[in-house]
Image (cartoon, helix red, strand yellow):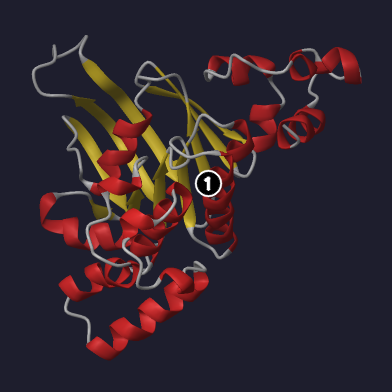
Amino acid sequence: MIEFKKVDFKYPGQNKVSGRVLSNIDLRMEKGSFYSIVGHNGSGKSTLAKLITGILTPEKGEIFVDGLPVLEENFISIRRMVGYIFQNPENQLISTTVENEIAFALENLCFKREDIKEKVDDIISWFELEEYRNTPPNMLSGGQKQRLAIASVVVMEPEYIIFDEPTAMLDKNGREEVFKTIKKLSEHGKTIILISHDLKEIIAADHVITMQDGKVSGIWKKEEFFSSIDLITQAGFKDLPPEILFSKYITGNESPVDYIIKEVSNQ
């Protein structure tokens, strides 16, 4: 599992208390589940995710991945266990072709050439990138770039994959393309941690973690989260269709979770 114990974090130069971004975070995320982290902008979602891989370091408290402390001496091991996908795929793509991009991390870890070829071939096939094998990444569409960024992480076979609003910069087709990939990874047993402002994406999760003012305000089963209009709106989803906002009157139920999930899925 991934575990936070009494974690505080603030960025350098901020006031010790009022400038704190995360405060007293206690959290456990079990292996094999799909988690979505939701909340208003500035609630601490991305900061929490970056602490898991050591991109950021907590001011106080401890973080563990499968029992291994997230400390500098363990970063190589941690970053093989946890992959991170940024909002903008161009922040991750550095090679001249799709094939080279996927092979890059394996080459840096001194994998044997024949092993690299086998792994790269498997990943290119799995991500349906065969026709783009020799294409420069900058020639791909937004959705294809993000799929390539995901592929370059998945080739390392991490147990946990963090997605930090991976579809925010994409058009409708790109979003569908990338989210199909995320669901496929979840179905193949990867632990998914997804930061998203899209209700359609959150519906795919097993658990929803709500954040407010730098604290975890709740961990909910998907059905619990979607059974409460208050939880949905408190998490920052203000522009809900009238059919959802008034669904309890339409259905006659106080907790119209099935109706809400159906309505959001059809949007």
| In the image, farthest residue toward the bottom | 114
Q: Is residue 203 above or below residue 216?
A: below
Left or right for 63, reference 250: left
Q: Is residue 198 above or below residue 133?
A: above
Percent of width and height locating residue 71: 16, 49
* The one of 187 and 145 positioned closer to us in this rendering: 145
* The one of 93 and 224 positioned closer to us in this rendering: 93
Q: Is residue 140 above or below residue 26?
A: below
Find numbered disc 1 in the image and state the secondary structure of the residue it sits on: helix
Image point (22%, 27%), residue name: 9
Percent of width and height locating residue 91: 26, 46
- Please say whether residue 229 is visible from this viewpoint: yes
- Please say whether residue 31 is visible from this viewpoint: no
Kindly identify which residue carries mark 1.
Answer: 174
* The one of 224 and 188 positioned closer to us in this rendering: 188
Percent of width and height locating residue 23: 29, 22
Left or right for 220, reference 63: right
Q: Quadrant of residue 18?
A: top left
